Amino acid sequence: MPSIRLLSPRLANQIAAGEVVERPASVVKELVENALDAGADRVDIEMEQGGVKLIRVRDDGGGIAEADLPLALSRHATSKIVSLDDLESVASLGFRGEALASISSVSRLTLTSRTQGQEAASRVEVEGRDMDAHISPAAHPVGTTVEVRDLFFNTPARRKFMRTEKTEFNHVEECVRRQALSRFDAGFTLRHNQRVVQNLRPAESMLDRERRVGSLCGQKFIDNAVVIDAEATGLRLWGWVALPTFSRSQADLQYFFVNGRVIRDRLVAHAVRQAYRDVLFNNRHPAFVLYLEVDPASVDVNVHPTKHEVRFRDGRLVHDFIFRTLHKALADVRPDDHFRGAVAQSFGREIAGQGEPLAGDAAPAWQARGGQPVGPSYGSQTPATGLGGQAAPQQDWRASDQMAFYQSLSGGGVSTPQEPASFEGTAAMPLEQAVSPDGGEEPPLGYAIAQLHGIYVLAQGSAGMIVVDMHAAHERITYERMKRALAEQDLKSQPLLVPLSLAVSQKEAALAESHGANLQQLGLQIERLGPEMLAIRQVPALLRGADAEQLVRDVLSDLIEHGQSDRVEAVTHELLGTMACHGSVRANRQLTIPEMNSLLRDMEATERSGQCNHGRPTWTLVTLAELDKLFLRGR
């Protein structure tokens, strides 16, 4: 066996570079983070051939003193932490002190810097097997420039794994996009092969921030986004979340920052998915740009080589805070929020006559107040009416539906609400009758004018024509009312005639035993029979026909991974969604004009009314501009 030898500094740095420097984008990330940590207000990135030939990053930060330059390119040398206490509450983006050493070991690196107190700048390079630092005078303003040439020139095996120039630059562009979203107070310039790709000025005001997000994530994202800003228990979550109708086929527009650091975290992803659960269509992904501010001491950032993952001291608290904030933000969305996005795409950022930003914080007048939806009064229209046109409390639906639902909750059999009574009456009305009788404020979804093929309700408003899928809309209204009714009473359990034995691991058995009280609140009574054996004695009455074994295994899996589980609630809501679907108004049902208007008013007062239980849209807007374009008006 060969004798043990000490690795040379260059080889040790090249081994470390295997984790830190994966591709040119990794170099850009580390250099830009160093610039931001130095207090830079402006960061310029210049590249050639996708970053393989040249990467130059210049900043106007505090700079590095001449005496510190030899250490700057040494391993484990940093000015950001000194003791273990500093490591446990890291507030900077970088802290390990190995990025520059790793980069210089696989490239030809030159660092030029000048501080405010120096008369002239200095340049440092490393060369040779032992990476000895060589310092020389240079001309440079206050700040730092790092020039990286011929990346991986001395590690040909790594260079073989490089992709095409376009692919590598796309990764760099995504890296710069993340950094620009993380620091609105700094300006960024990105050049590739002498061509300016991005030129972003510092964004201080909310409008400037929205413009930056729009330029980086697309204007349609901002037009269809809801602004959130919530604070509780030492946590603050703010940013933009897209409406469910602006979903993506892949998770390519999801940016989450913790104290300015972009991360990818399973706990955060689970909380977001849970908040969007019943408003997204199958296999669609939400879009968001969110910022979480926490005490640096409550989050550990030293858990991944590339610092893309973090570990929260109290993960359950963070998960609940993110979920509840997003859940409430999506629940408070009303048709007028969708309108702002739809109209903005036709008319631009400002809607003529409104004079307010599209993504403002002001809540619409018909939004839920005090936790309960409130139907507005429009002229002589009767607020909060049911589909039958009769005035009724907003929280209730027909008595026969309630009886069937309550019987199912109490174990009297799962029965779906009966279909609404037969509707009779005209399906159209003159256009002049579709306006508010007293000239009052127009509701978001306007006034019904006709029914199309017994499927769609046509309404008109000042913005154009609104088309409503009456079954999908009524399905969401019924579903939300059933959920509220269920929340107002305890979840009843159904004892099993023969307890179901379940073989599990010792960890799962211990978890079920320690969380017995929490599982009981979910309607699950689970008893531990042995080291690796459980007995299921009771299940929720609504789910007595479900696969109890798979349900319990899923719940235990969630408890292991996230410390909590919402499986029972998810399956319960899925059943309620099926009941609401079967109990909603069907196609070819002729509605009267009052009934159609009643449906529109209920939609305006119902949470998440923009989508049905399966994530399909319930209505769409065809603006006057779009209609004029179809008929070539004004040309």
Image (spheres, rainbow, N blue to C red):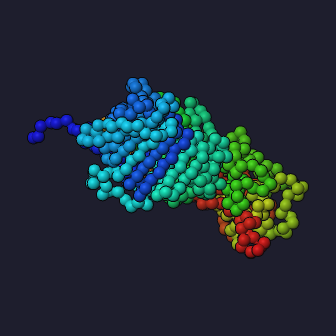
Instruction: Name the residue rendered at 27%, 54% in the picture.
Output: 157
For residue 429, above or below residue 532: below
User: Would residue 125 appear left or right of 198 to someone viewing this image?
Assistant: left
Quarter where residue 633 is shown: bottom right
Viewer-proximal residue among 492 and 94: 94
For residue 264, above or below residue 49: above
Q: Quadrant of the C terminus?
A: bottom right
Instruction: Name the residue rendered at 90%, 55% in the picture.
Output: 438
Residue 498 in the image, given as x and y percentages of width and height = 41, 45
Residue 517 in the image, given as x and y percentages of width and height = 48, 33
For residue 141, above or below residue 355: above
Residue 67 in the image, given as x and y percentages of width and height = 39, 29
Q: Quadrant of the N terminus?
A: top left
Q: Can residue 69 be seen from the camera position used here?
A: yes
Q: How many marks?
A: 0
Residue 184 in the image, given as x and y percentages of width and height = 58, 42
Quarter where residue 386 is shown: bottom right
User: Would residue 614 appear left or right of 299 to someone viewing this image?
Assistant: right
Instruction: Name the residue rendered at 35%, 40% in the picture.
Output: 125
Q: Can residue 571 be seen from the camera position used here?
A: no
Q: Residue furthest left?
A: 1
Quarter where residue 525 is shown: top left
Viewer-proximal residue among 398 and 106: 106
Q: Residue furthest right?
A: 438
Instruction: Name the residue rendered at 38%, 54% in the picture.
Output: 53
Viewer-proximal residue among 497 and 614: 614
